[in-house]
Amino acid sequence: MLKYFIDNRHMIWSLTLQHIGLTLTTIVIATIIAVPLGYYFASHKIANRVIMPIFSLIYTIPSLAFFVLLIPLFGLGTTPALIALVSYTMFVLVRNTVVGYQQVDDRMVEAARSLGYNRWTIIWRFKTLYALPTIISGLRIATTSTIGIATIASYINAGGLGTMLFTGLNENNYTEVVVGSIVIAVFALIVNWALERLQTRVLRYVSGLS
């Protein structure tokens, strides 16, 4: 197994970079969309009740089935993969963003208004800052989930470490499957650890402001 890893290190590194790129692109796109949506839903309960079940429904669709359903519309490659991955990620990010903003103390917001802070300052300096630990918690869950689902995206030629798993299974090369699985697991564990550390630091900082 170690010999396989050494002999194929350049290929493994290339697939790892593809996997990182797919995951990072998904998270950036989903975050840009989800945080403003979550803020809106937090203060508009009707919209929250109507739209969130749709995200929840998409989240329950098996990933491979979702990827296959997108092929007739977008073909193979990264485009259908990103559409599916962003759709899955949205549910977790929007849900946690809504919860984060709803947990902000209204008395603190009113106190900020009475001190003369404008609307945008209140949103960013008070509401978003205090909602941030919960948002990052959602980001951690969404990112590790995306790393796993992006593995399946290799089935539709989106690249990434899942290529090793599918190729290994097709060729009965179980060493390739095991090595690919280990690299994916290590990648997910490192990302989860880093985001957990970030969440802890942000929570400590916000708690110090209270």
Image: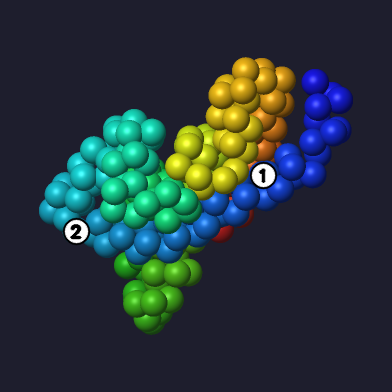
Which residue in the protein does label 2 denote? 44
The color scheme shown is rainbow
Measuring from the top left, give residue 106's x and y in whole percent.
Answer: 31, 58
Which one is in front, 111 or 160? 160
- Residue positioned 67% across, 50% down in the render: 17
Which one is in front, 184 or 206? 184
Which residue in the protein does label 1 denote? 15
Measuring from the top left, give residue 138's x and y in whole percent.
Answer: 46, 44
Image depth: mark 1 or mark 2 in front: 1
Q: Name the image quarter holding the N terminus.
A: top right
Tell me the amino acid under the disc marked 1.
Leu
Residue 144: tell me if it is visible.
no
Which one is in front, 210 or 30? 30
- Up the image or down, 172 lies above or below 116; here it is above
Residue 67: tell me if it is visible.
yes
- Label 1, secondary structure: give it: helix
Tell me the amino acid under the disc marked 2.
His
Q: Is residue 173 left or right of residue 36?
A: right
Measuring from the top left, give residue 26's x and y in whole percent.
Answer: 48, 53
Which one is in front, 174 or 203? 174
- Residue positioned 86% across, 33% down in the render: 6
Q: Quadrant of residue 181?
A: top right
